[in-house]
Amino acid sequence: MTATTTPQNATTTRSTVNTMTVLGAKAPAAPARPAWQELVEAVRETGEYPTDEKAAHVTRIVLAALGGHVVGDERVELAHRLPEEAARLIASQIPVAQPLTAAQFVDRVATRIEGATPATARWDVSSVLGALPRFVDDALIDRVLAELPSGYALLFGRPELLPAS
């Protein structure tokens, strides 16, 4: 005996599968987190660092500094989308009471990097933050930037658009 499916049964089957998916019975697999090395390589390329060690060092410092400035859902989502080591750096920071301006943020990073000047720290910060869009979608970057004082967009490699007066 050959089983045939009537159009009504096919529709019912599709509907059941779609309902099961919505209810979580067949949830799609979450995208895999990128590896720490992928982030380091992106920063090394963006910042033209001579070694992975230098790129990793700068990445750790900048992400730790950023972690105190990004809060709420944006912080959670940013940590979720980045490699696990990056997520720990961001999530382990105590949120600041008042976010620093972009210039103050760069100056703070400069104090954490041996031999850094404000100019080299700006390069370091921009190299790390400019690499993040390879791992995080534009909508999340937009939400993160909305939380921060003006001036941070340039550090993420984006134009700083000023509201019309």
Image (cartoon, rainbow, N blue to C red):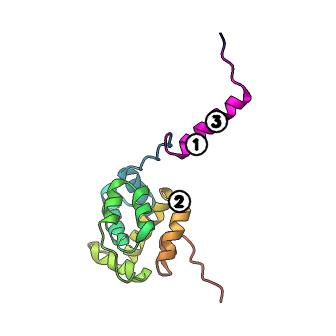
How many numbered discs sit on the rendered protein? 3
Disc 1 marks which amino acid?
Thr
Closer-to-camera residue (67/1): 1
> Can you tell which mark lies on residue 19?
1
Disc 2 marks which amino acid?
Asp
Residue at 50% over, 57% down: 134
Res. 138 image quadrant: bottom right
Disc 3 marks which amino acid?
Arg
Q: Which residues are magenta?
A: 3-25
Residue at 62% over, 83% down: 163
Q: Secondary structure at mark 1?
A: helix
Q: Is residue 32 left or right of residue 139?
A: left
Q: Secondary structure at mark 3?
A: helix
Query: Is residue 137 covered in magenta?
Result: no
- Residue 76 lies, in percent from the top left, at 41, 63
Res. 113 image quadrant: bottom left
Q: Is residue 154 visible?
A: no
- Residue 47 lies, in percent from the top left, at 42, 63
Q: CA distance from mark 3 to mark 2?
A: 31 Å
Name the quadrant of the C terminus.
bottom right
- Residue 2 lies, in percent from the top left, at 66, 12
Res. 39 image quadrant: bottom left
Closer-to-camera residue (46/71): 71
Mark positioned earlier in the residue sequence (2 or 1): 1
Residue hosting label 2: 137
Residue hosting label 3: 14
Mark positioned earlier in the residue sequence (3 or 2): 3
Quick check: 108 above or below 73? Answer: below
Query: Is residue 23 covered in magenta?
Result: yes
